Amino acid sequence: MAEKGREFNGFMGGDWYRRWAALFGMGPGFYRRGLGDLTLESGARALDLGCGPGALSLALAERAAPDASIVGLDLSEDQLACARSQADNAPCPVEFRRGSMDELPYPDGHFDLVMTSMALHETPPAVRRATVAEAARVLRPGGRFLLVDWSRPRLGLWGVVWFPLVCRGENNRDNWNNVYPALCAAQGLELVQDGYINSITRRQLFRRPEAPQPG
């Protein structure tokens, strides 16, 4: 599935990925800040796109009702194996499956929350656009789409570290120019929160409006 985006396997996947991520500021606190005040109520369903070793899914499980459920989707078997090794201890059911975020095997309106963290920038632009459309499709009316990814760096340590890497290349333009509000608006999602959680990582929360009530 190379055409779908980068797979993190071997020395860059699983427990190794977790170590590299923590080294670059993406430890447990990073994912808690990414979630903000999001929780999962009783019976609610969440989908984590490009879940990696499961950090965001498991952070959400810590604040979910016992009968809520979370599914994580990723291309990498190494990432999924690492995520599954932790899922048995989660406070609510968490399942990890292999798949591509732009082709979701779920019906319309199936999820209350769709989220993705530090994954979209690893995909080609066409996959990003299809992913936003799929996220909107599987959200129920009133559901939310959480998007955490790098954006144009602000001043700060990580902005200085990452600036030479993220400002180059055709594949980086979407994040640099923050095209996601426009992409989401085209799919009927409204932006309700927008801010940085560090000097390079932007957190945006979108919402599918409630269906109009019959007159």
Image: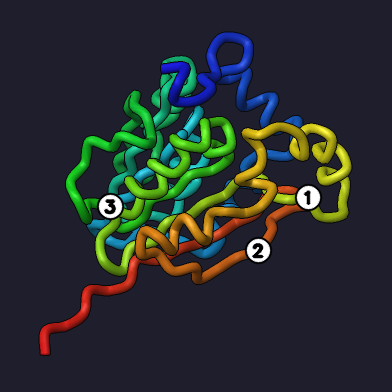
Q: The residue under label 3 is which amino acid type?
A: Arg
What residue sits right under mark 2 in the picture?
Answer: 195
Q: Residue at x 45, y 36 (%)?
A: 126
Extreme-bottom residue of the structure: 215
What residue sits right under mark 3 in the picture?
Answer: 137
> Could you say whether the residue bearing mark 3 is in a helix, strand or loop?
helix
- Whether residue 122 appears in this view of the structure is yes
Q: Position of residue 122 (x, y in %)?
A: 57, 31
**Residue 46 in the figure: left or right of residue 204:** left
Determine whether 117 is above or below 181 in the image: above
Which of the 4 image quarters holds residue 117? top right
Extreme-top residue of the structure: 10
Q: Residue at x 33, y 54 (%)?
A: 136
N-terminal of the two: label 3 or label 2?
3
> Could you say whether the residue bearing mark 2 is in a helix, strand or loop?
strand
What residue sits right under mark 1 in the picture?
Answer: 153
Q: Residue at x 67, y 31 (%)?
A: 21
> Could you say whether the residue bearing mark 1 is in a helix, strand or loop?
loop
**Residue 103 in the figure: left or right of residue 168:** left
